[in-house]
Amino acid sequence: AEGSVQCMSCTGVHAWCGPCAVKAHRNLPFHKVQRWNGTHYEPTSLMELGCLWHIGHGGDPCPQNSSDPDPDESSQFQMTIVHTEGIFSHEVSVCNCPGSHPNDWHLDLLRQRLFPASISKPKTAFTF
C-alpha cells in the first residue's frame, strides 16, 4: 500500500510502499522501519519487506548467483548483525563468481565493515 512504511532513522518525514522503502535503503541496512497495520505503525525490518543485501559488486547482485550449482554451498543466507542501533536480521547474498569460495565469505564481510563471528560460513557479524 502506498505510504505504508516509514523510517525512524531517516531525517525528515518519509512514507513509502514496501518495495520503495527497500530501494531507498539499499545502502542503509541498519535503519529502523515501521509498517502501518491499519491502526498504527509497528516495527518491522527491511528483511521482512523483502530486502536482499548484496555483499560485493557494489551492492548489485552477483551475476553468477542466478543459478546456484550446489544448494549446500548457497550464496544466499540469513545473517544476524549486531550494530550500535540494535540487532538486525538480514537476508544476505554474497559473490559466487568463479574464483570466489564459501571459505572466503568472511573476507567479503570484512570489506563491508562487518566483523564475522567465525571465518567458516559466518551467520553472525558485528559492525565496526
Image: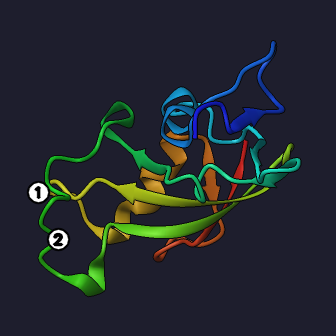
Q: Residue furthest bottom?
A: 72
Q: In the rendered view, does 111 fall on the left or right side of 62? A: right
Residue 79: x, y in percent? 58, 66
- Which image quadrant for residue 60? top left
Depth order, front residue of 56/53: 53
Q: Amino acid type of disc 2?
A: Asp
Instruction: Tell me residue 2's x, y (percent).
Output: 58, 33
- Specify how the rendered protein is coloured: rainbow
Residue at 86% across, 44% down: 84
Q: Where is the N terminus found, in terms of image quarters? A: top right
* Residue 16 in the figure: left or right of residue 127: left
Q: Residue at x 64, y 54 (%)?
A: 115
Q: Amino acid at mark 1?
A: Pro
Q: Which residue is mark 1?
A: 98
In front: label 2 or label 1: 2
Location of residue 58 (image quadrant): top left
- Front residue of 32/94: it is 32
Residue 98 quadrant: bottom left
Q: Is residue 83 above or below residue 88?
A: above
Q: Is residue 75 left or right of residue 21?
A: left
Residue 122 position, x and y percent, is 54, 71
Q: Which residue is mark 2?
A: 68
In the displayed structure, 31 sits above or below 72; it is above
Q: Secondary structure at mark 1?
A: loop
